[in-house]
Amino acid sequence: MPNKRISTGCGLGMQARYDIVIVGGGMVGATLALGLRRALPESRSIAVIEAVDLPEESSGTWQPSYDARSSALSAGAKDIFASLGLWDAISQAAEPILDIHVSDRGHFGVARMHAHEHGVPALGYVADNSWLGQVLLSDVKATQGIDLLCPVSVKQILPEVDDSTLTLDAPGGEQILNASLVILADGGRSGLSRKLGIESDVAEYGQKAIVANITPAKHHNGVAYERFTDEGPMALLPRPGGDCALVWTMPEQLADERLELVDEDFLAELQDRFGYRVGRFKKVGERFAYPLALKTAREQVRPGLVVLGNAAHSLHPVAGQGFNLSLRDVQTLISTLAEAIEQQKNPGSLEVLKSYQQQREKDQQQTIGFSDQVVRLFSNNNVALAGARNFGLVAMDLLYPIKNRFARQAMGLSQGMNTGFQQNVSSHARQGEQAQ
């Protein structure tokens, strides 16, 4: 069927058929589109469908995933962005993490990691989501061979091996679109996944994360702090200019109460929980709160369909692994599809998509499992568990092989979390649970 252009009413036209359609123009969807465009032949057509309208001059805040939060980018994520030609732009407003300091409030265990010990310029980087959005979307708009369709919402998807059918709600009215492969990257609240009957396993943490920008009296000097408390873990990440990005998790009701506090009282409570490692907290920006849950889709591939990003797995922010895990998924999916197309295989075939899933299975399982385990272990006041986690922190701080393996996983340079730290903590955690 020859391709014809269909008016969308958003300044762009769309074809009646594409090789690959990405639903969702957030950080994962935009990165995937740019990576595929660089990896696939020019003859292969790509579209990104986004339900939110695109302003004439993108500030990066138009799409929900480009919100007020910051993302901790691993060293591996930097390498992925560099391979796509994006890192030079992203790095202009990305703060390097030179050291990581992990502590447990009220206990002796402390672990420290330093970039120079591991032979890297930085353990990771912190960038505002709004800045990532500005870089990614500007590049998507400037890249020939990517059709950005917005504001267009997908009402229905009928995935098939040879040709999937999408029913679209576009400004010009309902439209029908066909694609060899549809990739769902529409976020953790994906309504399309539910419509397709893709069930998810959801574990509610009963917590919310308060995020805000904090100005401390002392410069952070490139140190990222991870602090565990009896209420839940908190992170203070370095931002350009000396400010810090706060991610503070706590029970939902307590989070709602703290959101209502005046700035002075909020900072006082934060100071009490965090301490004075960066001096007195002087200022807090606008505060937001997000409910936390571990969500994993039971299916990530079907014939003609891939579920990606938060639609596939949504993690607790404690270890900053969610977006980094999704970027590794993106990297593998790009290489898998490029190889399949080079071999003249249908990119939507189940054989090709199963190959992608099998390559990602181990890293996903271990990263998700470790993140969940750390949250539960460090949000528990049981005496035996407190001893287990502090033993793990001390062991990691003192034993370089354990620290190095842990650091490489955190940097996204080594897939798999089977470290001595994890083994020791897991063993003691089981003993603590049996003692309860």
Image (cartoon, rainbow, N blue to C red):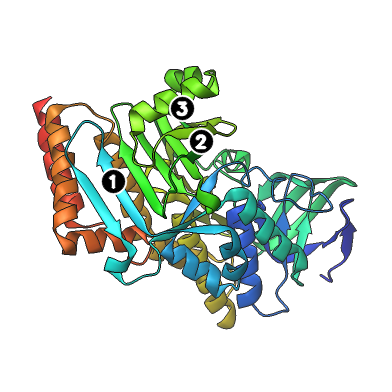
Q: Position of residue 198 (x, y in %)?
A: 52, 43
Q: Are marks 1 and 3 in contact (CB under 8 Å)?
A: no
Which residue bears the numbered disc 1? 102
- What's the amino acid at mark 1? Val
Secondary structure type for disc 1: strand
- What's the amino acid at mark 3? Leu
For the point 41% across and 54% down, which residue is it?
221
Q: Are marks 1 and 2 in contact (CB under 8 Å)?
A: no
Earlier-in-chain disc, 1 versus 3: 1
Which residue bears the numbered disc 3? 267
For the point 33% across and 33% down, which residue is it?
275
Q: Nearer the viewer, mark 2 or mark 3?
A: 3
Q: Position of residue 432 (x, y in %)?
A: 12, 32
The quarter of the image holding the C terminus is top left
Res 159 seen here: no
Secondary structure type for disc 3: helix
Mark 1–mark 3 Cα distance, whole angstroms, equals 21 Å
Mark 2–mark 3 Cα distance, whole angstroms, equals 13 Å
Which residue bears the numbered disc 2? 211
